[in-house]
Amino acid sequence: MISRLIYRVGSAALLGLLCGAPVLAQEQPGDYAVQLPLSLSGEGPWYRLDVPMALHFAARYGDLRDLRVFNAEGQALAYALVAGQGESRDSQQEQAVKWFPLYAEQGDSSATPSLRVQRSTSGTLIELLDEANSSATPALLRGWLLDASALDEPLVRLQLDWSGGQDGFQRFSIEASDDLQGWQPWGSGQLARLSFDGERIEQRQIELPGRKARYLRLLWQSPQQAPQLTAASLRSQRSDSVSAPLVWSQPLAATRSPDGEYQWQLPLALPLERLKVELTQANSLAPIRVSGRNEAKGAWQSLTQGLLYRLPENGVEIRQDELALPGWAVQQLRLQVDERGGGLGGEPPQIKVAVRATQLVFLQRGSPPYRLALGRSGAASAALPLTTLIPGYQPQRLQQLGTAEAALQAANLAQQERAAVSDSGWKRWGLWLVLLLGVGLLALMAVSLLRSPKAE
C-alpha cells in the first residue's frame, strides 16, 4: 500500500518536472543581465537601432548572439543584425569638349586620316592637320577627333549635336587613344534624327565602356551623308570607396607594467578595427607597437605599428593619433613605446577602440514598453536574415525604417550586471535543488518497488 502511494507521488512529481522543463527552458527577460527600455519613433512595424559600444561591452559574446528584444508580455521579438559594410559611391560629371574634323582623300571613304597634333603646355589640343596630302584641299569629311584630355575619370557617355545631313540614322565607329598613335576599338555608335508630321525623334547619346582615354576618334560609316557637329560633351564617372562606419568606446584607462608597457583589459573579446591614443602633451612624437591577445596568459600577437605625433607645422597643429587594426577578436591590448621619441608623458595614456557598426532591426509585436536585453551566458543566436525578417527587402529600404533608441547609462548597466549575476546564482542553485529532489524521488520509487512482495 505504501509502495503504491510512493509510486503515485513520485510519478506526479516526475510528471511535474517534465512539464516544467519547457517553462524553465523558455527565454525570459529576467534571464539577461542587462535590460534597457526602448523608445520608438517613425513608422513601423520594423524598427532599427544603431548598437553603441556600451552594448557591445555589456554583451557576453562579441557577435551579439545573446541580444534579444522583448515586449511587455515577455515575448521575444523577431530580429536581424546588420553589420556595417563599406560602400562604393559613384558621381558623374559632364563636360563639353573640343572636336576637330578628320578628312580623307576624295573617293576613298574607307581611308583613316593621319594626324599631326600640336598641344600647349596645358595639354590642350590646338591644331590638327592631314599629313596624307597637305597641299590638296580635303573634300571628304571622314570623321571627328574629340579631345578628352581634361577628363581624368573613366568615360561613360558621349553626347553629340549636329546640323545638316539627311534625316535618318548615322552610324560610326568609336576608337580611343592616349597618344594619337595606337587606337583601341570602343565599339560603334549611332545618331538618329527623324521628322514626321511636325514631330521629331532624336538619338544623341552613345554609351561608352567606362574606360579612360585622352582622345576619341569617330569615323563615319557613310561619310558622304555625315552631318556637321555643332556640340560634343563627355560624361565621366568617379567611384569613391566609403569605409564601413565605426562605433567608438569611451576613453579606457591603462595600467603600466614595470618594463614600461601599457595594457588595457576589455570586458570581452571584440573584433577591433581602429585604435585612438590620447596625446595630452604638445610636441609629442612616439613610435609604437600594438599587440593583442584573448587570454591573460596567452601569447601576444602583433596587430600594428606606427608613429604617433602632435606637432606644429606652419602655425597649425597636426595630429596622427589613430591606427588601423586588422579586425581580430582581442580582449587585451598592449602598447609598447619607443622611448627614443620622448614617450607619451608621465601618466598612462587613455585609448578609444572602435568596432564595425552593427544595426539591430526588429519586428514590433505585442504591447509596449519594449526592452532590449543582453548579457546571458550560453545563449545561442536567434537572429534571422534580413531578407527573411522583411519580405521583399531592398537595400534602400533600411534607411526608411522607424528608429529605436536605448536608454543608456553606464552606472545602470554596471548595476544591472551585478544584480543579474546575483540572481543567476540563486536561480542556478534552485534549479539544482529541484533536480536533486527529482532524483531522490526516483531512487525512493526504485527501492520501494524492489522491496515489494512479488505476489503483489
Image (cartoon, rainbow, N blue to C red):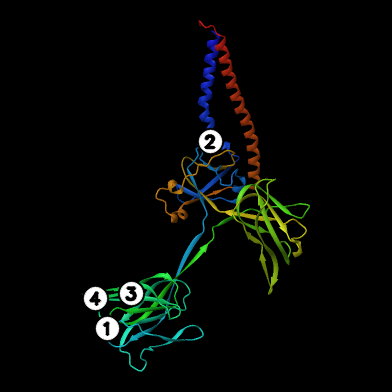
Mark 3 or mark 4, earlier in chain: 4
Q: Is residue 441 above or below residue 155?
A: above
- Label 4 and label 2: CA atoms lie apart by 73 Å
Q: Is residue 403 above or below residue 375?
A: below
Kindly state the secondary structure of the residue where label 1 is placed: helix
Q: Is 378 on the left-hand or right-hand side of 366?
A: right
Kindly state the secondary structure of the residue where label 2 is placed: loop
- Label 1 and label 3: CA atoms lie apart by 20 Å
- Contact check, label 2 and label 3, Cβ < 8 Å: no
- Label 1 and label 2: CA atoms lie apart by 82 Å
Q: Which residue is mark 4?
A: 195
Q: Amino acid at mark 2?
A: Glu
Q: Nearer the viewer, mark 3 or mark 4?
A: 3
Mark 1 or mark 2, earlier in chain: 2
Q: Amino acid at mark 1?
A: Gln
Few, some or many residues within 10 Å of mark 1 (<14, 14–19, 20+): few
Label annotation for residue 27:
2
Q: Amino acid at mark 4?
A: Ser
Label annotation for residue 204:
3
Q: Which residue is mark 1?
A: 224
